[in-house]
Image (cartoon, helix red, strand yellow):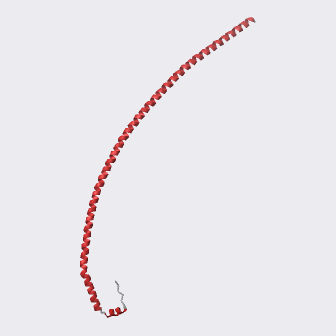
Amino acid sequence: MKRVLRPQNRATLKAVTTEERLYKLEGIVEGVMATLPGQVSSLEQRTELLRQELRAEIAELRQEMAGLRQELKAEIAGLRQEVKAEIADLHQEMAGLRQEVEAKIAGLRQKVEAEIAGLRQEVKDEIADLRQETAGLRQEIKAEINTALNRLMLYFTALAAALAVLTFLR
């Protein structure tokens, strides 16, 4: 704190000798030196207490962290087991679904094969019917052609006879 000197104090201050000033300063220094070791040791004690508190806090934090690590490891192990169980369940479910799909495909394949066999038989029957019909038509056509040829032969025979009669008549 700075002291403001009034004009009358300045005059008094000039009257104080250097020796008196040194004496006052020595007293101040001795007073400070007398209280300083107590304050330093008090500060050292506080620092040591703070160190001990920090060490205790650090030890507690380490223990807490170790506990948390253990909990985390246990939780991870539990989750890992759950995931493995879920995966196993999914594999079983997929195997069941695969069997269902394969059974449905086999059923559909049988139905399709039965349909194809039925259609094949229908086509064969149709072809057989068409062959019979064609054979019948051939017989009819042959009969018609034979009838037409027989008529033609009769016409030619009649023509030949008419020509023969004309030849004789001439």
Q: Quadrant of residue 107?
A: top left
Q: Residue at x 33, y 46 (%)?
A: 84
Q: Residue at x 59, y 16 (%)?
A: 140
Q: In x, y percent, where is residue 72?
A: 30, 54
* Quadrant of the drawing holding the N terminus: bottom left
Q: Residue at x 25, y 77 (%)?
A: 39
Q: In the image shown, does 149 or 72 lie closer to the viewer?
A: 72
Residue 37 vs 17, above or below: the answer is: above
* Quadrant of the drawing holding the C terminus: top right
Q: In the image shown, does 48 or 155 lie closer to the viewer?
A: 48
Q: In x, y percent, where is residue 40?
A: 25, 77
Q: In the image shown, does 84 or 16 lie closer to the viewer?
A: 16
In the image, farthest residue toward the top: 168
Q: Is residue 127 left or right of residue 15?
A: right
Residue 26 vs 139, above or below: the answer is: below
Q: In x, y percent, where is residue 11?
A: 34, 93
Q: Is residue 4 left or right of residue 154?
A: left
